[in-house]
Image (spheres, rainbow, N blue to C red):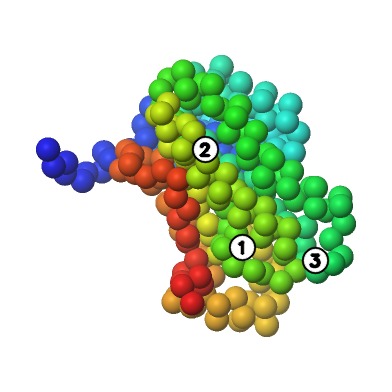
Protein backbone atom coordinates (compact mmCIF):
# COMPACT_ATOMS: atom_id res chain seq x y z
CA UNK A 1 0.00 0.00 0.00
CA UNK A 2 1.31 3.43 -0.94
CA UNK A 3 2.00 5.62 2.06
CA UNK A 4 1.32 9.31 1.89
CA UNK A 5 4.16 11.51 3.11
CA UNK A 6 2.95 13.54 6.07
CA UNK A 7 4.48 15.50 8.90
CA UNK A 8 4.00 12.43 11.12
CA UNK A 9 6.77 10.72 9.15
CA UNK A 10 9.19 13.25 10.64
CA UNK A 11 7.77 13.30 14.17
CA UNK A 12 9.96 11.99 16.97
CA UNK A 13 7.55 12.42 19.86
CA UNK A 14 8.06 9.70 22.46
CA UNK A 15 11.64 9.05 21.39
CA UNK A 16 14.77 9.65 23.44
CA UNK A 17 18.06 10.78 21.91
CA UNK A 18 21.58 11.11 23.30
CA UNK A 19 23.70 13.73 21.56
CA UNK A 20 27.41 13.79 22.33
CA UNK A 21 29.39 17.03 22.20
CA UNK A 22 26.11 18.87 22.70
CA UNK A 23 27.33 22.04 24.43
CA UNK A 24 27.88 24.27 21.42
CA UNK A 25 28.00 24.59 17.68
CA UNK A 26 26.74 21.66 15.66
CA UNK A 27 25.91 19.53 18.71
CA UNK A 28 23.77 22.27 20.22
CA UNK A 29 21.87 22.77 16.95
CA UNK A 30 21.27 19.02 16.67
CA UNK A 31 20.00 18.76 20.25
CA UNK A 32 17.55 21.63 19.71
CA UNK A 33 16.38 20.19 16.38
CA UNK A 34 15.50 16.91 18.09
CA UNK A 35 13.53 18.75 20.77
CA UNK A 36 11.67 20.67 18.06
CA UNK A 37 10.79 17.28 16.52
CA UNK A 38 9.39 16.15 19.89
CA UNK A 39 12.19 13.99 21.30
CA UNK A 40 13.52 14.02 24.85
CA UNK A 41 17.23 14.84 24.79
CA UNK A 42 20.16 13.59 26.85
CA UNK A 43 23.07 15.99 26.50
CA UNK A 44 26.55 14.48 26.46
CA UNK A 45 28.81 17.28 27.74
CA UNK A 46 32.55 17.37 28.23
CA UNK A 47 31.85 19.62 31.24
CA UNK A 48 28.39 18.99 32.66
CA UNK A 49 28.45 22.28 34.55
CA UNK A 50 28.56 24.27 31.30
CA UNK A 51 25.62 23.79 28.95
CA UNK A 52 25.04 27.52 28.39
CA UNK A 53 21.31 27.22 29.03
CA UNK A 54 20.75 24.42 26.52
CA UNK A 55 18.82 22.15 28.90
CA UNK A 56 16.45 24.97 29.84
CA UNK A 57 15.92 25.84 26.18
CA UNK A 58 14.98 22.23 25.42
CA UNK A 59 12.58 22.14 28.37
CA UNK A 60 10.95 25.33 27.11
CA UNK A 61 10.04 23.36 23.98
CA UNK A 62 8.10 20.88 26.12
CA UNK A 63 10.69 18.09 26.10
CA UNK A 64 12.79 16.56 28.84
CA UNK A 65 16.51 17.38 28.97
CA UNK A 66 19.18 15.46 30.85
CA UNK A 67 22.68 17.02 31.05
CA UNK A 68 25.35 14.33 31.47
CA UNK A 69 29.08 14.33 32.10
CA UNK A 70 30.43 12.68 28.95
CA UNK A 71 33.96 13.22 27.76
CA UNK A 72 33.98 10.65 24.97
CA UNK A 73 37.70 10.04 25.40
CA UNK A 74 36.90 8.62 28.86
CA UNK A 75 35.15 5.29 28.32
CA UNK A 76 33.84 5.10 31.88
CA UNK A 77 31.99 8.38 31.28
CA UNK A 78 30.59 7.06 27.98
CA UNK A 79 29.18 3.96 29.65
CA UNK A 80 27.81 5.94 32.61
CA UNK A 81 26.10 8.49 30.35
CA UNK A 82 24.36 5.81 28.30
CA UNK A 83 23.24 4.00 31.46
CA UNK A 84 21.94 7.26 32.97
CA UNK A 85 19.98 8.05 29.80
CA UNK A 86 18.17 4.71 29.97
CA UNK A 87 17.58 4.98 33.71
CA UNK A 88 16.45 8.61 33.85
CA UNK A 89 14.60 8.95 30.54
CA UNK A 90 13.38 5.36 30.24
CA UNK A 91 15.02 4.43 26.96
CA UNK A 92 17.73 5.21 24.45
CA UNK A 93 16.19 5.14 20.99
CA UNK A 94 18.51 7.44 19.08
CA UNK A 95 22.24 8.12 19.37
CA UNK A 96 24.09 10.96 17.67
CA UNK A 97 27.88 10.78 17.94
CA UNK A 98 28.76 14.40 17.33
CA UNK A 99 31.79 14.87 19.61
CA UNK A 100 35.02 15.13 17.66
CA UNK A 101 37.78 17.43 16.57
CA UNK A 102 41.20 17.67 15.00
CA UNK A 103 44.67 18.41 16.26
CA UNK A 104 45.06 21.62 14.28
CA UNK A 105 46.89 22.21 11.01
CA UNK A 106 49.94 19.94 11.26
CA UNK A 107 51.88 18.47 8.31
CA UNK A 108 51.82 14.67 8.33
CA UNK A 109 55.57 14.47 8.94
CA UNK A 110 55.19 16.49 12.15
CA UNK A 111 52.26 14.66 13.74
CA UNK A 112 53.13 13.51 17.25
CA UNK A 113 52.04 10.22 18.71
CA UNK A 114 50.10 12.11 21.36
CA UNK A 115 48.18 14.16 18.79
CA UNK A 116 47.53 11.06 16.68
CA UNK A 117 46.13 9.15 19.64
CA UNK A 118 44.02 12.06 20.88
CA UNK A 119 42.43 12.59 17.45
CA UNK A 120 41.55 8.89 17.12
CA UNK A 121 40.29 8.71 20.71
CA UNK A 122 37.81 11.55 20.28
CA UNK A 123 36.65 10.86 16.72
CA UNK A 124 36.81 7.09 16.31
CA UNK A 125 37.25 5.30 19.63
CA UNK A 126 34.63 7.45 21.36
CA UNK A 127 32.17 6.84 18.52
CA UNK A 128 32.63 3.07 18.52
CA UNK A 129 32.30 2.64 22.25
CA UNK A 130 29.30 4.97 22.53
CA UNK A 131 27.60 2.80 19.90
CA UNK A 132 28.64 -0.32 21.78
CA UNK A 133 27.29 1.06 25.07
CA UNK A 134 23.94 1.89 23.42
CA UNK A 135 23.66 -1.44 21.62
CA UNK A 136 22.24 -3.62 24.39
CA UNK A 137 19.36 -1.24 25.13
CA UNK A 138 18.53 -0.86 21.44
CA UNK A 139 18.74 -4.60 20.81
CA UNK A 140 16.44 -5.29 23.75
CA UNK A 141 13.80 -2.92 22.36
CA UNK A 142 14.29 -4.09 18.77
CA UNK A 143 14.76 -0.52 17.63
CA UNK A 144 17.60 1.97 17.31
CA UNK A 145 18.85 4.78 15.14
CA UNK A 146 22.51 5.81 15.16
CA UNK A 147 23.93 8.82 13.33
CA UNK A 148 27.66 9.35 13.43
CA UNK A 149 29.10 12.71 12.46
CA UNK A 150 31.81 12.12 9.90
CA UNK A 151 33.13 14.89 7.65
CA UNK A 152 33.86 15.74 4.06
CA UNK A 153 37.44 15.38 5.33
CA UNK A 154 36.82 11.64 5.21
CA UNK A 155 36.29 11.93 1.45
CA UNK A 156 38.84 14.50 0.34
CA UNK A 157 42.42 15.23 1.35
CA UNK A 158 42.86 18.39 3.42
CA UNK A 159 46.52 19.44 3.73
CA UNK A 160 47.69 19.43 7.32
CA UNK A 161 44.73 17.30 8.46
CA UNK A 162 45.93 13.79 7.62
CA UNK A 163 44.98 12.15 10.92
CA UNK A 164 41.62 13.91 11.16
CA UNK A 165 40.82 12.92 7.56
CA UNK A 166 41.76 9.30 8.30
CA UNK A 167 39.70 9.24 11.50
CA UNK A 168 36.60 10.60 9.77
CA UNK A 169 36.97 8.15 6.88
CA UNK A 170 37.11 5.41 9.51
CA UNK A 171 33.92 6.73 11.14
CA UNK A 172 32.06 6.42 7.83
CA UNK A 173 33.27 2.88 7.26
CA UNK A 174 32.61 1.88 10.87
CA UNK A 175 29.05 3.08 10.30
CA UNK A 176 28.66 0.74 7.32
CA UNK A 177 29.92 -2.17 9.39
CA UNK A 178 27.51 -1.43 12.23
CA UNK A 179 24.62 -1.19 9.76
CA UNK A 180 25.40 -4.66 8.42
CA UNK A 181 25.96 -6.27 11.83
CA UNK A 182 23.10 -4.68 13.73
CA UNK A 183 20.35 -4.38 11.13
CA UNK A 184 18.92 -7.73 12.27
CA UNK A 185 18.12 -6.09 15.61
CA UNK A 186 16.15 -3.21 14.10
CA UNK A 187 19.06 -0.78 14.38
CA UNK A 188 19.83 1.60 11.51
CA UNK A 189 23.26 3.25 11.39
CA UNK A 190 24.13 6.17 9.14
CA UNK A 191 26.58 9.04 9.10
CA UNK A 192 26.61 12.59 7.81
CA UNK A 193 29.66 14.30 6.35
CA UNK A 194 29.46 18.10 6.61
CA UNK A 195 31.68 20.68 4.98
CA UNK A 196 32.94 23.73 6.90
CA UNK A 197 30.09 24.85 9.16
CA UNK A 198 29.97 28.20 10.93
CA UNK A 199 30.53 27.18 14.57
CA UNK A 200 32.77 28.32 17.45
CA UNK A 201 35.15 25.53 16.43
CA UNK A 202 35.68 26.94 12.93
CA UNK A 203 35.47 30.61 13.86
CA UNK A 204 39.22 31.14 14.10
CA UNK A 205 39.99 29.54 10.74
CA UNK A 206 37.16 31.32 8.95
CA UNK A 207 38.22 34.67 10.38
CA UNK A 208 41.13 34.55 7.93
CA UNK A 209 39.66 36.15 4.78
CA UNK A 210 42.04 34.30 2.45
CA UNK A 211 41.20 30.92 3.98
CA UNK A 212 37.48 31.72 3.98
CA UNK A 213 37.56 32.73 0.31
CA UNK A 214 39.35 29.51 -0.59
CA UNK A 215 36.79 27.42 1.30
CA UNK A 216 33.88 29.23 -0.36
CA UNK A 217 35.46 28.64 -3.75
CA UNK A 218 35.90 24.92 -2.96
CA UNK A 219 32.22 24.63 -2.02
CA UNK A 220 31.65 24.34 -5.73
CA UNK A 221 27.90 24.62 -6.11
CA UNK A 222 26.73 27.02 -3.41
CA UNK A 223 29.91 28.98 -2.61
CA UNK A 224 29.05 29.70 1.01
CA UNK A 225 29.82 28.41 4.49
CA UNK A 226 27.23 26.05 5.98
CA UNK A 227 25.09 26.79 9.03
CA UNK A 228 24.53 24.30 11.91
CA UNK A 229 20.79 23.99 11.21
CA UNK A 230 21.56 22.74 7.71
CA UNK A 231 23.24 19.69 9.20
CA UNK A 232 20.88 19.25 12.15
CA UNK A 233 17.87 18.79 9.86
CA UNK A 234 19.58 15.94 8.02
CA UNK A 235 20.45 14.21 11.30
CA UNK A 236 16.86 14.42 12.52
CA UNK A 237 15.64 13.09 9.16
CA UNK A 238 17.89 10.02 9.41
CA UNK A 239 16.39 9.23 12.83
CA UNK A 240 12.80 9.76 11.68
CA UNK A 241 10.28 7.23 10.34
CA UNK A 242 10.76 8.83 6.91
CA UNK A 243 14.26 7.31 6.75
CA UNK A 244 13.35 3.82 7.98
CA UNK A 245 14.86 2.06 4.94
CA UNK A 246 18.12 4.04 4.94
CA UNK A 247 21.11 2.42 6.65
CA UNK A 248 24.85 2.19 6.08
CA UNK A 249 24.92 5.47 4.20
CA UNK A 250 27.05 8.58 4.54
CA UNK A 251 25.04 11.66 3.62
CA UNK A 252 27.42 14.31 2.33
CA UNK A 253 26.38 17.86 3.26
CA UNK A 254 29.03 19.91 1.52
CA UNK A 255 27.37 22.38 -0.83
CA UNK A 256 28.97 20.62 -3.79
CA UNK A 257 32.63 20.47 -2.62
CA UNK A 258 33.13 16.76 -3.38
CA UNK A 259 31.30 16.70 -6.73
CA UNK A 260 34.24 18.40 -8.41
Measured along the vertical axis of the image, is residue 219 above or below residue 130?
below
- The image position of residue 247, as x and y in percent, is 41, 43
Residue, disc 3: 108
Q: Earlier in the sequence, mark 3 or mark 2?
A: 3
Q: Earlier in the sequence, mark 3 or mark 1?
A: 3
Q: Secondary structure at mark 2?
A: helix
- Mark nearest the camera among 2 and 1 is 2
Location of residue 211 (image quadrant): bottom right
Visible residue check, residue 33: no
- The image position of residue 107, as x and y in percent, is 80, 69
- The image position of residue 246, as x and y in percent, is 37, 45
Which quadrant: the N terminus? top left
| Residue at 79%, 48% in the rendered image | 118
Visible residue check, residue 214: yes
| Residue at 87%, 57% in the rendered image | 112
Density class for disc 1 (Cα within 10 Å; few <14, some 14-19, many ≥20) is: many
Residue, disc 2: 178
Measured along the vertical axis of the image, is residue 86 above or below residue 173?
above
Q: CA distance from mark 3 to mark 1?
A: 15 Å
- The image position of residue 35, as x and y in percent, is 45, 38
Q: Secondary structure at mark 3?
A: helix
Density class for disc 2 (Cα within 10 Å; few <14, some 14-19, many ≥20) is: many
Residue, disc 1: 153
Density class for disc 3 (Cα within 10 Å; few <14, some 14-19, many ≥20) is: few
- Mark nearest the camera among 3 and 1 is 3
Total tally of numbered discs in the picture: 3
| Residue at 80%, 53% in the rendered image | 116
Q: Is residue 122 left or right of residue 35?
A: right
Closer to us: 245 or 91: 245
Q: CA distance from mark 3 to mark 2?
A: 29 Å
Q: Is residue 89 left or right of residue 246?
A: right
Amino acid sequence: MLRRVSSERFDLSGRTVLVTGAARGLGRAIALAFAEAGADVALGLRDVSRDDGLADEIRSLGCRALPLQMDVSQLDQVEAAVAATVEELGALDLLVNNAGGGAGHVPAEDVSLEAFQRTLDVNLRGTLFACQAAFSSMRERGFGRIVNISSQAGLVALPGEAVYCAAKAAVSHLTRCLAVEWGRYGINANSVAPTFIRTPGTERSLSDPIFKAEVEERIAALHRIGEPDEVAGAVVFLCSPAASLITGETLVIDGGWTVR
